[in-house]
Image (cartoon, coloured by chain):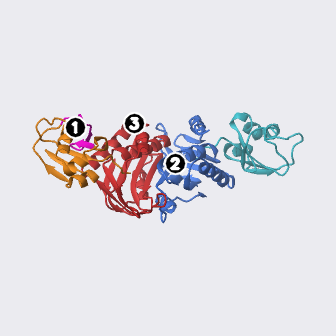
Chain colours: A orange, B cyan, C blue, D red
Amino acid sequence: MKLLYFAWVREKVGRSEETIDVPQGANTVGDLALWLKSRGGGYAEAFADMKRVRAAVNQEHADLLAPVGARDEVAFFPPVTGG
Amino acid sequence: MKLLYFAWVREKVGRSEETIDVPQGANTVGDLALWLKSRGGGYAEAFADMKRVRAAVNQEHADLLAPVGARDEVAFFPPVTGG
Amino acid sequence: MTVKVQREDFDPGAEIARLHEGRSDIGAVVSFVGVVRGDSGGDKLRTMTLEHFPGMTERELERIAEEARERWSLDGVTIVHRYGELKPGERIVLVVTAAGHRHAAFEAGSFLMDYLKTKAPFWKREMRESGEHWVEARESDDRAAERWR
Amino acid sequence: MTVKVQREDFDPGAEIARLHEGRSDIGAVVSFVGVVRGDSGGDKLRTMTLEHFPGMTERELERIAEEARERWSLDGVTIVHRYGELKPGERIVLVVTAAGHRHAAFEAGSFLMDYLKTKAPFWKREMRESGEHWVEARESDDRAAERWR
């Protein structure tokens, strides 16, 4: 499973991408976020308040209940501020 | 009093402007339009249906009740179609 | 605030740039370009002639621009309207609004076009394949202008 | 439908012209140019850096453009969004909509900007006199996007 991080989520976790094995029991974006938070350090900071984090699965906006699997690319980032 | 005509009002009355003495009893745009209509010919055609004619007094939109006098410039024209 | 009534074509990009370049307080520039359409249910337009009321046209456009500035917080308004003979595909009118925020610029632009359509003394005469005629004012334009009352 | 995500500046006039020149079925072209503002209550902006999500950005802008085409009768949509470092006064985003009639072009342009603000994966980092920070998403932008639901 490929993970991508942007903006201050990227800064807090300290990397822009990584590839991980799907954590046991992580079936949704929300599960994955909780697992990442449990890693502690910058991850715990980045995912401290899930209301401030948004996600995309395979480049489409996704909510916490969206399913994720080994072949998915999951991105985490703050609410967007373009335009 | 200076009178100006535009678009099909101009075509019907057959001129783009003229200077006239204020007709007796013509105190408003509506009075003036009725007097012009009474001239007959192209004037009668142009002012046949006053709902189709608009007016401006000294380059400002004016309704039939707007007062007019000897020093005014009064224009008659169809509803505008610019833009 | 700039109002121009002219025979010649205009340059939308230059007018947009003129409103915001060299300034850093403007966040949004909205422009509207009106183009002469050639189609009308199969009866093709050959040319169109725009008659106007010199003097009143400029004053009326300035009044409309002034009203937009009273209603919205604008940093600039430009209106350019052509007259004379125009062919299908030619630009006919330009409205540009500049503001700190996008909604003011969009709304003021839409307002200016609605008002211009019902207030600016222009009259279109169309030369179509089927013959010539003066364009009738449209009730939908009156209703559009009523939205802003 | 054209979507571009680029570092370089763009030319609003050229993009407007590209949507309507050579055609006589388009009556209205509306453009929106977003410009980097330098002011914020006395705390001046020095530069801004726009990060984005390459790949998703283009797809998301195409999805938004497609949605506008489903809602309004449009003859063309162009979206250009810059990323990288920008200074106050620089152009940052361009949206152009072309349609037969003006209200479709205005509404679609306003819709595209509201959706782009809440959907396109861009993040602004500001370098101000007082320090650096990531720009917070604004609730007013969410409310603006809600208008179209």
Residue type highlighted by circle 1: Gly
Front residue (pair C72, A74): A74
Residue C68: image location, x then y, percent:
59, 49
Task: Point out the stretch of residues depicted in magenta.
Answer: A54-67
Residue occupied by mark 1: A30
Say left or right for D44 vs C60.
left
Mark closer to the observer (3, 1): 1
Q: Label 1 near label 3: C-beta < 8 Å?
A: no
Identify the secondary structure beneath mark 3: helix
Residue occupied by mark 3: D71
Residue type highlighted by circle 2: Ala
For mark 1, does the 10 Å Cα neighbourhood hold few (<14), some (14 to 19), or many (20 or more) residues? some
Q: Label 3 near label 2: C-beta < 8 Å?
A: no
Q: Are marks 3 and 1 on the same chain?
A: no
Identify the secondary structure beneath mark 1: helix
Say left or right for A24 vs C109.
left
Residue occupied by mark 2: C104
Say left or right for C46 vs D93.
right
Q: Name above or below for residue D55 compared with residue B34.
A: below
Front residue (pair C99, A5): A5
Q: Label 1 near label 2: C-beta < 8 Å?
A: no
Q: Chain of mark 3?
A: D
Front residue (pair B58, A56): A56
Q: Residue at x 66, y 46 (%)?
A: B7
Residue type highlighted by circle 3: Arg
- The answer to if B11 sits in the magenta stretch is no
For mark 3, does the 10 Å Cα neighbourhood hold few (<14), some (14 to 19), or many (20 or more) residues? few
Q: CA distance from mark 3 to mark 1?
A: 33 Å
Q: Are marks 2 and 1 on the same chain?
A: no
Residue C74: image location, x then y, percent:
55, 53
Mark closer to the observer (2, 3): 2
Q: CA distance from mark 2 to mark 3?
A: 23 Å
